[in-house]
Image (cartoon, rainbow, N blue to C red):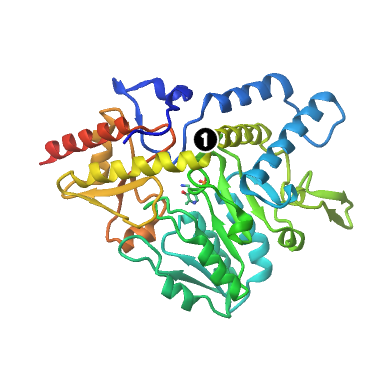
Amino acid sequence: MSALLDVKREFPILAQSARGKPLVYLDSAATTQKPRAVLEALRRYYEEDNANVHRAVHLLSERATKAYEGAREKVAAFLNAPSIREIVFTRGTTEAINLVAHTFGRTRVGAGDEVLVTHLEHHSNIVPWQMLCQSKGAALKVVPVLDNGELDLAVLDRLLGPKTKLLALGHVSNALGTINPVRDIVAKAKAKGIPVLIDGAQAVPHLKVDVQALGCDFYAFSGHKLYGPTGIGALWAKAEHLDAMPPWQGGGDMIASVRFEETLYNVPPAKFEAGTPDISGAVGLGAAIDWLTALGLDRVEAHEKALLEKGTALLSAVPGLTLVGTARHKAGVLSFTMEGIHPHDIGTVLDRQGIAIRTGHHCAQPLMERFGVAATARASLGVYNTEADLEVLAKGLTKVREMFA
Ligand code: PMP
């Protein structure tokens, strides 16, 4: 088997040594590294175009506005959104979900209603709904997860009921890598008239996403997990929702006119983008989308699938290692525990060998509790990873065992 992609050289940060060893970066589910194309787009923006957007007639402002709005067009095309008006820039997935909770949620969810999430969710797709439910006297319901890390779809069917005002679920689990059958799940919810929000933070870097084919109402993602900068992400929402939703943050740009007696709000997406946005972030995100699209998401998917298979085989052969999350459809996440060794010790020993993985609860404490562990060690893959990286990891884990045996 040969890896299909060879792009590591395009990531300057990966050329360095860590602890005197060649850096092996296996923490892309936390954040991805950035290709030169993104770094150059950021530098070019600040060297040539930097100005505030939307509010001036001068040349630089015109260029900055064009760059910012151009990035919105790229996000819309990337998700196959019907209109650029449906793309709201946010700080990331967390802010996008909070936006929906504070606007759509605040107006749609009342006492006695239910919001449905799943046991696989990241905290950012649990806590905003929990806060909303608490403030409204509504109930948070949870779709259980099976032992292999797949959702219990039979229970999901039963939980989608007349009181359900929203289903909020992840496309891909950051902690286990499970790819949920979101298209089928959305169809089930929509058949009962229930709106669906999808947390796509871990999906967009790995899979081709088409919001129209999915049929959902909201889709959220973060730029930094997509080879773009931190501090920028997006919410796609159906125009009918954005039109009906009240604004949440007030300030510049989100208004049509302000008088002390009354303020009239701007149309979406500006209605939801108060204040100076992360212009350079959007430019960087646009460059990341261009870069990934040129690479081809089907090739990315094939590359990561091949690596995941290789990694699964290598890790399964390590004595005393248990993979947590063995769903039939998985993205590039290898979550595991080792008998008698604390995950933090695994991470520390690997770090000394230049291998970067993540250990902890991965912002999914209910899921960890479900699997009876406080934490796991997690190696997660990106486009730049190679078979050699996984071999280094497997050797590193053998060392971990030797040290603690
Ligand atoms: N959802 C999932 C599935 C995630 O993996 C993450 C990030 N780990 C988030 C939401 C939150 O993303 P951000 O911190 O970029 O807002």
Identified at 69% across, 58% down, the residue is 238
- Residue at 19% over, 46% down: 341
Please tell me which residue is depicted at 30% across the width and 30% down the height of the picture: 388
The picture places residue 206, in percent across and down from the top left corner, at 48, 44
Q: Is residue 130 visible?
A: no
Q: Position of residue 261 (x, y in %)?
A: 89, 57
Q: Secondary structure at mark 1?
A: loop
| The quadrant where residue 29 appears | top left
Rendered view: 121 above or below 109: above
Left or right: residue 384 versus residue 235 is: left
Task: Pick the quarter of the image with the N terminus.
Answer: top left
Q: Residue furthest front?
A: 1
Q: Nearer the viewer, residue 251 or 346?
A: 346
Q: In terms of depth relative to the viewer, which is nearer, 91 or 263?
A: 91
Q: Is residue 99 above or below residue 69?
A: below
Q: Report x, y in % for residue 20.
A: 29, 20
Return the x and y of residue 115 as percentages of the image width and height. 55, 70
Quadrant containing the C terminus in the rendered view: top left
The relative height of residue 280 versus residue 206 in the rendered view (above or below) is: above
Q: In the shown orientation, is residue 263 left or right of residue 362?
A: right
Q: Please state which amino acid type lies under the numbered disc 1.
A: Tyr
Above/below status of 143 relative to 323: below
Identify the residue under disc 1: 227
